[in-house]
Amino acid sequence: MDTTHPVYMELYYQMRKREDLRSQEEIMLIALKEWMMREYGQPTDRGYQWKDLFLPHGTRLRITHRRLCYFAQVESDLLMADGKITTPNAWAAEVCGMVRNAWRDIYIRRNYREPWTRASDLRAGAERRPGINRRRRARRSTD
């Protein structure tokens, strides 16, 4: 590898500045692992749980209101919009100025290769998975 590339030089500078004793190769392996988890949808334990729907770290949310798009993002286990911690319902109400159905108005994109999908459609898919809503199904079977 060409270690004179500006990215390597910046890495070297930042490591020296912080007196980091790890090797550049070790740092690059950590960065590559995190990138692969984020981009290739590997299981992650970080994310935001919205009722039945799990949104992994890095998931983007979008609301379109009056022809303007507003975005939020899952960072670690928090939903962040405009630098503030929020919930999907509170964010939809803040953007639209009134109480809205967040499941209907929010679109979700888990990674850049996925299309934007309505939250209610993702929720419906989550309900079809085995193991979810077992209690509800068990109650219905005994009625």
Image: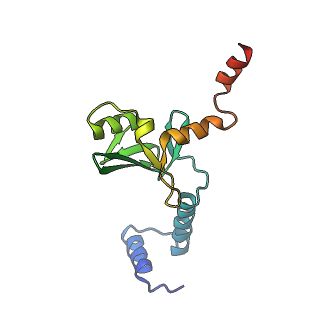
| Image coords of residue 65 (percent x, y) | 31, 44
Q: Residue furthest front?
A: 67
Q: Residue furthest top?
A: 143
| Image coords of residue 62 (percent x, y) | 39, 48
Q: Residue furthest right?
A: 142
Which quadrant of the view contains residue 88?
Answer: top left
* Left or right for 37, reference 142: left
**Colour mapping:** rainbow
Which quadrant of the view contains residue 52?
Answer: top right
Q: Say which residue appears at 48% left-offset and 69% top-offset.
A: 21
Q: 48 or 1, which lies in front?
A: 48
Vertical arrangement, residue 119 with respect to residue 10, above or below: above
Q: Quadrant of the N terminus?
A: bottom right
Q: Say which residue appears at 32% left-offset and 51% top-offset.
A: 69
Q: Say which residue appears at 61% left-offset and 55% top-offset.
A: 42
* Left or right for 126, reference 111: right
* Left or right for 10, reference 28: left
| Image coords of residue 130 (percent x, y) | 70, 36
Q: 48 or 118, which lies in front?
A: 118
| Image coords of residue 128 (percent x, y) | 65, 36
Q: Say which residue appears at 57% left-offset and 37% top-offset.
A: 124
Q: Quadrant of the C terminus?
A: top right
